[in-house]
Image (spheres, rainbow, N blue to C red):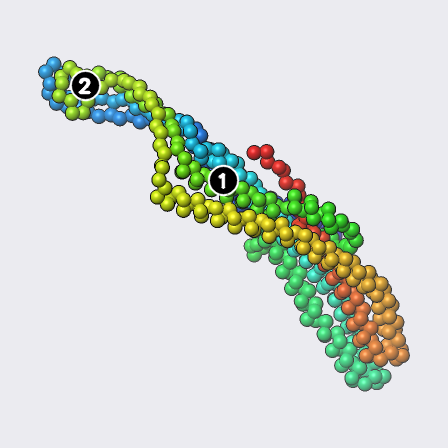
């Protein structure tokens, strides 16, 4: 018995275990983490417009030719460097802000991926519990009906009832077979979904997760107005939509910088450790030697006439920003409707649960009494079928109410942004 118990509970996993495993191993979350690292590199690229550009190369070669008082062939090499520093560029401020927004977008995309995968895992866990309990209820009910089939068979063999009673009992029992198989398949499908979201290695020897626990019902009372206002501040998808609007606005500013002048300072230098190397094209024997030198200066550019390249790019960026703004307004407007819908669902499920909870005990007592009367011949097979069917209906309805209640609570947590708190980035 201990071995059997251990075999049944060794693979059991709680809801907390499912969520933790999803956070650690889910491929979608891992991909979002990699995208966050990529965004950090993208921010460095956008910030690079501020920093100086330093280049260094080392040319080398051989100079030949016969001149009086000089060797015919000389090997030379020198170092050449250049430093360019932007002095004025209107693209610098929006580029810095765009780099910060890029990282914030990746962070919120990671948060959104985490929320979606946790929500999926939570729903799969509830679905597995529901189908397993539903299968247990139906199998228990089928066991009672099989006992009735055996009883009617004995009574038929004894000549106390006709064959129709035995046939009716058999049909009633076998009608539950497809329902049991449906719940078994539903449980297996929920287990498979749990394994996928938890990134379980699904090889031929792998065992599917076995959820631990049972569905519970705890009535909740929520303040719709305050929760709606809080959801507008907490929800990840809304934060992400706002960041996309900011990013599009900065992109437009970066492109529009092409309208304005820019200035940059530059310093170039050559270091030549050897002497006697003539410049290219030189004909003098004593002049035009290469030597170490440093030059500095500034460059100023301004495209006065736009040929359409900058203006067209600005228009495209502006339309992208306007589209993002429209999507943001639509998303914000849908929050209140979504929370109102879930609130109404919770209210209706609460009333439904109370109704089935009150009817289950009565239906159970009625089914027990009819079963006893059927054995003594005081109740008909039709009365027994109706009583058992009503009892199964109330049990199934109560279990379904528990399941829908937990699903609605999960949807409420998602719609209000309650899966976890997001850290505010100060950039």
Q: Earlier in the sequence, mark 2 or mark 1?
A: 1
Query: How far apart are the alpha carbons under marks 2 and 1?
Result: 51 Å
Q: Is residue 100 visible?
A: yes
- Choose mark 2 or mark 1, whichever is in front: 1
Residue 159 left/right relative to 172:
right
Residue at 46% of width from left, 46% of height from top? 317
Residue at 19% of width from left, 22% of height from top? 279
Q: Callout 1: helix, strand or loop?
A: helix
Q: Callout 2: helix, strand or loop?
A: loop
Report which quarter residue 166 is drawn in. bottom right
User: Vertically, is 4 above or below 367?
Assistant: above
Instruction: Indicate the position of residue 256 as horizontal and vertical percent values.
Output: 43, 40
User: Vertically, is 395 above or below 264?
Assistant: below
User: Vertically, is 18 above or below 61?
Assistant: below
Check the picture and name the quadrant holding the N terminus: bottom right
Check the picture and name the quadrant holding the C terminus: top right
Q: Is residue 16 visible?
A: no
Residue at 44% of width from left, 35% of height from top? 91
Residue 387 left/right relative to 197:
right
The reply to whether the C-beta atoms of the residues labelled 2 and 1 are less than 8 Å apart is: no
Residue at 41% of width from left, 27% of height from top? 87
Please tell me which residue lies in front, 157 or 70.
Answer: 70
Instruction: Indicate the position of residue 412 as horizontal and vertical percent values.
Output: 70, 52
Dot 1 crowding, Cα within 10 Å, few <14, some 14–19, many 20+:
many
Instruction: Indicate the position of residue 290 as horizontal and vertical percent values.
Output: 22, 19
Which residue bears the numbered disc 1?
A: 250
Which residue bears the numbered disc 2?
A: 288
> Going by the picture, which residue comes out furthest to the front?
305
Instruction: Indicate the position of residue 71 as horizontal and vertical percent values.
Output: 14, 17
Dot 2 crowding, Cα within 10 Å, few <14, some 14–19, many 20+:
some
Please tell me which residue lies in front, 374 or 338.
Answer: 338
């Amino acid at each position: 018995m201990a071995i059997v118990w251990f075999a049944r509970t060794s693979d059991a996993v709680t809801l907390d275990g499912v969520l933790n495993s999803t956070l650690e191993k889910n491929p979608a979350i891992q991909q979002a983490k990699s995208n966050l690292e990529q965004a950090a590199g993208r921010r460095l690229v956008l910030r690079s417009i501020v920093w100086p550009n330093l280049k260094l190369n080392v040319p080398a070669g051989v100079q030949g030719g016969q001149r009086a008082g000089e060797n015919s062939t000389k090997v030379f090499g020198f170092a050449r460097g250049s430093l360019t520093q932007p002095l004025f560029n209107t693209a610098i401020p929006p580029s810095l802000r765009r780099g910060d927004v890029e990282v914030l977008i990746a962070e919120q995309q990671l948060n959104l991926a985490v929320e979606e995968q946790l929500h999926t895992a939570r729903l799969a866990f509830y679905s597995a519990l529901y189908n397993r309990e539903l299968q247990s209820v139906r199998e228990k009910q089928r066991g009672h009906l099989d006992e009735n089939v055996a009883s009617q068979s004995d009574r038929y063999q004894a000549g106390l009832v006709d064959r129709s009673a035995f046939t009716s009992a058999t049909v009633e029992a076998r009608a539950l077979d497809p329902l049991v198989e449906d719940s078994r398949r539903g449980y297996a499908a929920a287990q498979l979904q749990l394994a996928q979201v938890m990134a379980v290695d699904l090889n031929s020897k792998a065992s599917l997760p076995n959820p631990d626990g049972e569905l519970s019902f705890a009535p909740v009372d929520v303040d719709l107005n305050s929760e709606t206002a809080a959801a507008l501040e907490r929800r990840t998808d809304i934060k992400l939509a706002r960041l996309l609007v900011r990013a599009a606005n900065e992109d437009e500013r970066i492109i529009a910088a092409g309208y304005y002048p820019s200035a940059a300072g530059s310093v170039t230098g050559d270091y030549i450790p050897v002497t006697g190397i003539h410049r290219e094209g030189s004909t003098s024997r004593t002049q035009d030697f290469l030597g170490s030198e440093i030059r500095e200066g500034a460059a100023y550019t301004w495209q006065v006439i736009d040929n359409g390249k900058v203006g067209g790019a600005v228009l495209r960026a502006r339309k992208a920003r306007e589209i993002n703004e429209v999507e943001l307004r639509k998303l914000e407007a849908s929050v209140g409707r979504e929370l109102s819908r879930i609130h109404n669902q919770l209210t209706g499920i609460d009333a439904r649960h109370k109704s089935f909870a009150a009817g289950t005990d009565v239906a159970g007592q009625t089914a027990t009494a009819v079963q006893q009367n059927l054995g003594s011949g005081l109740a008909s097979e039709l009365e027994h079928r109706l009583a058992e069917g009503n009892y199964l209906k109330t049990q199934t309805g109560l279990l379904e109410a528990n399941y829908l209640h937990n699903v609605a609570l999960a949807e409420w947590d998602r719609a209000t942004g309650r899966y976890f708190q997001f850290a505010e980035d100060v950039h």
